[in-house]
Image: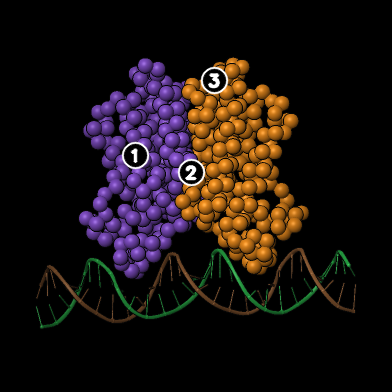
Chain colours: A orange, B purple, C brown, D green
Amino acid sequence: MSTAAPASTFDTRTRILNLAEELLLARGFNAFSYQHIAKELQVKPAAIHYHYPSKEDLGTAVIRRQLGRLRKWRGLPRVTELTPAQQLEALLDVYRQRACAAHGPQVCFFGALAADFLTLPAAMQQELRTFSEELTQWLAGVLAAGRADGTLQFSGHPFSKAAQVLTTLAGALQVARVHGEGQFQYILKQLRTELLPAA
Amino acid sequence: MSTAAPASTFDTRTRILNLAEELLLARGFNAFSYQHIAKELQVKPAAIHYHYPSKEDLGTAVIRRQLGRLRKWRGLPRVTELTPAQQLEALLDVYRQRACAAHGPQVCFFGALAADFLTLPAAMQQELRTFSEELTQWLAGVLAAGRADGTLQFSGHPFSKAAQVLTTLAGALQVARVHGEGQFQYILKQLRTELLPAA
DNA sequence: AAACATACTTACTTACTAGTAAGTAAGCAA
DNA sequence: TTGCTTACTTACTAGTAAGTAAGTATGTTT
C-alpha cells in the first residue's frame, strides 16, 4: 500500500511528491512548507510552485496518489487470493511497517490529515473522505467474509467494526509517536486476539 | 472532565486559555496564532504575550489545566462511587459530549496534539505524555475492577485494553470531523457492546 | 536556424508569524 | 501625592508563509 523509495532516482516532480508525503505524515499539513521541500531537494521554492502551483494542489496530489495505491493494492492477486483473515493481517502489516519506519513512526494518512481537517482546503477534505470511505468499505467486506467462513469473529455490523478497527489503527500510530512503538504493539495485539478466534 | 463556559464572564487570562483550548482542539497547535485569539477577544496580540509570554507557555498551560481537570474528575465522589461499568460509561459520555459540541465536533486533547507531536515544544510533549499515561492508568484500573466483578468483559491485559479503548475514542472524534457524528456513534456502540456483557 | 516547450532561477509581493520594547491609563498602598 | 503594580496598547523586528512574474539554460521539434 506504500513503499518508501530512494528519492534521488525519480524526477523532481515525483521527488517533491515523495517528500511532501513524508513531511505531511511527520508534521501535518500546516507544519510543512515549500521551503522545507525546496531545501531538501536543493532547488528553489518557486520550482515546487512550477510543478504544484498551490499547496492545495500538492496536498490533493499526495492523497490522490495514496488512493490510487489503495485501489491497486486491494486488487492485487497476492491480496485478492488471500483468505479474509490473511487480508486483515496484510492490512495490519501495512500499519506495522509504518510504526517501525526508519525515520520514526509515521501516522497514517487519515490520522495525519483528520487532525488538521478543519483547516484543509475543500478539495483535500473531499479526497480524504473518499479515501477513508473506500478503505472502510473494503475492510467491511473482508470482515463480513471472514465472519461468514468462521475465520474472523466480532459482534455488530461489519461496517461499524471496520470503522472501529481503522480508527484504532489510525490512533495507534499516533500513540506510537507519543509513547513509542511498544504501546502500538499492545494495541495491535489486542486487536488481533479479539478478531481472530483463539487457536 | 471538561466544561465549556461562557467566556465573557472570566478575566482575560482565563478567556485566553479557554479560546486557546478551543482553537487547539479545532485547528491543532500549528494552525492557530496569537492573532486569532487577540481578534476574538478584542485585544492586541501583545496582550496575549503579556499573560503567556510564548506559545509554548500557552500550550503547556492548556494541557496542564486539562490534566488538573482529569485528576479532579476521577477523584470526584460522583465518579469514585460509581461501579466500574458506570465509570466507563461516564468516560464515554465525556467523548460523546465532545462529538456533539455546538461548534462542530472537537477532537480530544490527545488526538489533537498527537498529530502535531513532532512539531511541539519539548515541554508540551512531556505534559502530553503525562496526561495520556494518567488517563490510561485510570481506565486500566476501571477495566480491571470491572472484569473482576463480572460487569465488564474483555481479553488481554487491562492496560492494553485501556490503551486500545482510548486510542479508539481519540480516533473516533477525528472520524466524526471527517464523516460526521453518525460514524462516531457506530464506533462507540461497537465499543460498548464489546465491553458490556450482553444483557 | 528558428520556434517552442520543459524545468527551472531570480527577484519580488503581500500577508502573517512569534516575539519585544517602550509607553500608558487605572487602581491600590504607603 | 508619590510610587508601584496590573493590564494592557503602540510600534516595532526579524523571520517565514504562499504565491507570482519575468528571465534563462537546455533540449526538442520543424
Mark 3 belongs to chain: A
Calculate the distance from the C-alpha at mark 3 to the C-alpha at mark 1. 31 Å
Q: Badge 1 local density, few (<14 within 10 Å), some, or many (20+)? A: some
| Mark sitting on residue B125 | none
> Of helix, strand and loop, which one carries label 3?
loop
- Rendered residue at 67%/57% (across/down): A16
Query: Residue A184: where, in percent of width, then height?
Result: 53, 36
Q: Is residue B190 above or below residue B36?
A: above
Residue A9 shown left or right of residue B57 in the figure: right
> In the rendered image, which quarter is residue A55 located in?
bottom right
Calculate the distance from the C-alpha at mark 3 to the C-alpha at mark 2. 28 Å
Q: Which residue is mark 2?
A: B178
Mark 1 belongs to chain: B
Answer with mark 2 or mark 1, whichever residue precedes in sequence. Answer: 1
Q: Is residue B122 above or below residue A171?
A: below
Q: Amino acid at mark 3?
A: Gln
Query: Residue B146: where, in percent of width, then height?
Result: 36, 23
Q: Which residue is mark 3?
A: A153
Residue B34 shown left or right of residue A132 in the figure: left
Please tell me which residue lies in front, B159 or B23.
B23
- Rendered residue at 34%/34% (across/down): B93
From where the camera sits, is residue B88 visible? yes
